[in-house]
Amino acid sequence: MNSRTFIKRLAVAADYVAHPPSGVVVLIYHRVGGGSASEVDLDPGAFDAQLSHLAEHHRVLSLDDAIDALAIGSPIDGVVLTVDDGTADFADVVVPALSRHNLPATLYAATRFIDEGIEFPWGAPPISWSALRDCVATGLITVGSHTHSHWLMDRLDASVIDGDLDRSIDLIGEHVGHSPAHFAYPKALPGSAEAEIAVRQRFRSAALAASRVNRPGHTDLHRLWRTPVQRSDTPEFFAAKARGGLRFEGELRSLAGRVKYRGMSK
């Protein structure tokens, strides 16, 4: 048993002690069918099986509907699908799979890569604006902001933060037809006090990670918790995550991310 599987097993055991509460589970995807060895680059068949599981066993909500319910504290159980960055496989693989299952999702787009046609740091080609418009035309896709430049937001000057967020908002409005209402912090790391103020002024919600369930009446919409999906998630582990489980794994990952990216800007 490798270390990832061991941690997941521990997290499953922890779920028996502290059962996940009711609420909204927000799942994070990154790439599907990208051909890399990354933990966040899923096999298309595995992704399709996950969507089948969600369609059969869960109520899959749009992010807007989930936020509406959480904002008023209305009792709700459901799963929200989100995808970060904006790589080409979103149009080529992810949206066709979502369409087959008729499931909504939100793409948090890092607009500089899309607008300039440059690869993401891990060698992934970006989606084009025209392909993204086609995705939105399905009626299943909402586009949120993942900043313009994908800089970490805990050490930038206020003027840089404002300019980067506004550039992202303007580009999405120009090319997709509406300004984004939702935001996801790069690397799921919280921003500085100045960054949080800027985000709260511009967006209805903002997402982090930590694999926690978003509980009606107990959720700060600008600290929305999300659960990353990994290629090492077996059907058992994925089902647990969809139920709001494996929080222990998520807390460890969040801690590791804060340590790994300490002092970095990207």
Image (tube, rainbow, N blue to C red):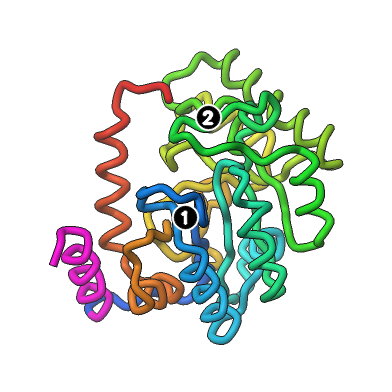
- Relative to 113, 141 lies left or right: right
Tag 2, which secondary structure? Answer: loop
* CA neighbours of label 2 inside 10 A, class few (<14), some (14 to 19), many (20+): many
- Magenta residues span 1-16
| Magenta-drawn stretch, dominant element (helix, strand or loop) | helix
- Relative to 96, 44 lies left or right: left
Quarter occupied by residue 152:
top left
* CA neighbours of label 1 inside 10 A, class few (<14), some (14 to 19), many (20+): many
Q: Is residue 14 magenta?
A: yes
Q: Residue at x 57, y 15 (%)?
A: 160
Extreme residue in the front direction: 35
Q: Is residue 50 magenta?
A: no
Amino acid type of the residue tagged 1 in the rendering: Trp
Quarter occupied by residue 115:
top right
Q: Residue at x 66, y 54 (%)?
A: 92
Quadrant assignment for the C terminus: top left
Quarter occupied by residue 246:
bottom left
Q: Position of residue 106 (x, y in %)?
A: 65, 54
Q: Which is more N-terminal, label 2 or label 1? A: 2
Mark seen at residue 225: 1
Residues 36 and 17: in front is 36
Q: Nearer the viewer, mark 1 or mark 2?
A: 2
Mark seen at residue 150: 2
Query: 168 above or below 211?
Result: above
Q: Position of residue 15 (x, y in %)?
A: 27, 75
